[in-house]
Amino acid sequence: MTQQTTKLNTKTEVTAAPAAGAASEVKHETTLFAENITHVGSLPITNALLTSVSAVLIIALLAIIIRVTLREIPGKIQNFFEALLEGALDLCDQVTNSRKISEKVFPLAFSVFLFILVNNWLGLLPLGGIGLIEDGEHGLSFIPFLRSGTADINTTIALAIMAVVSANLFGIFSIGIWKTFNKYVNLKALGGIFTRVKKDPTVLVVAPVTFFVGILELVGEIAKIASLSFRLFGNVFAGEVLLMAMSKILPYLLPIPFLFLEIFVGLIQALIFSILVLVYFTIASQDHDSHDSHDEHAEGPDAGRAEEHEHHTAKA
């Protein structure tokens, strides 16, 4: 006899109870946090960490195999991976609009894409049914060995912090530390009050607004971390809860279409995260001051000549 209950609040609890009585019930809890499966010294090893390490090993092994089997005259498999990389680089160009930036950012963005993709798909393997049975405060509980690393908020926050900090470092190396700093604390705009107020009194209004826009940009960097991490974690964790709920309604048959859906969702989420990383790097490498000075020059004599040219063209 099998008794099953499903409760979704802060956690989803599924109880698979043998007929031996309440004392022998084994509970399977899909919690918001990753579960400990062992310790290395004082360091707890969670099932999400184990999956993340497995993902890294799989990617490293795949890279070594591809590197060892590289040939001057490529075979079918090498042709496939070369076409895959070329297509990914072209997609990168469409986001950055610059092959120079793409060549610098592509290794990081593609590595993040592979890490998230392999993590997402490892969490869908039926190996999640293999794990430990521990005797806790609420009786016996089943803890699976595999839980997608991206279903752990710690992993997604770490990825998001890495992406945002790396983008700002890339901006510093691209346009300099002073211009990057001025994006957030725009001292140049405040200084313009004293140097431009005689020629342009509107700077008394524009400069403070520009300064506070820079402060908002700084808040936006923190919002990027929250947005990146919670989007990825929420989608992957919700997928795991959905598959578990479907498997308890009609085991084996009902989860199959949702399993294919989650494979697709895992691919899309990895693609979205890596494209956002590309966008952040591209924005960080752009010098807004050069655009402003270009605009100012455009408003000067050149702009007058351009307007005059357009006027003569219209007459013709």
Image: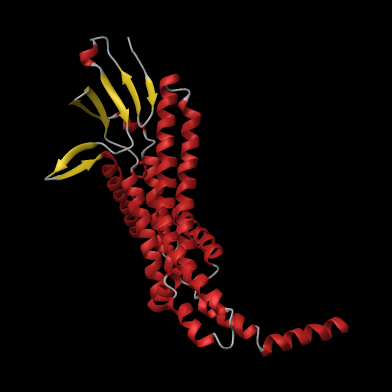
Q: As drawn, is 176 to the left or to the right of 15? A: right
Residue at 38% from the left image edge and 29% from the top image edge: 9
Residue 198, picture quadrant? bottom right
From the top left corner, tell me how far across and down residue 148 is, in percent.
Answer: 35, 40
From the top left corner, tell me how far across and down residue 216 is, in percent.
Answer: 46, 63
Which residue is situated farthest in the left direction here?
41
Examine the rendering and report whether any part of residue 71 can be seen.
no
Residue 140 or residue 179, whichever sits in front: 179
Q: Point out the image quarter for the N terminus.
A: top left
Residue 259 or residue 295, whichever sits in front: 295
From the top left corner, tell me how far across and down residue 33 is, in percent.
Answer: 30, 38
Placement of 42 over or under 274, stated as above or below: above
From the top left corner, tell me how far across and down residue 140 is, in percent.
Answer: 21, 22
Residue at 42% from the left image edge and 64% from the top image edge: 218
Q: Point out the image quarter for the C terminus.
A: bottom right
Placement of 107 over or under 228, stated as above or below: below
Count every numbered label the image shows and give the total.
0
Residue 8, picture quadrant? top left
Residue at 17% from the left image edge and 38% from the top image edge: 38
Residue at 60% from the left image edge and 83% from the top image edge: 296
Residue 78 or residue 14, whichever sits in front: 14
Examine the rendering and report whether any part of residue 9 can be seen.
yes
- Report the colour scheme: secondary structure
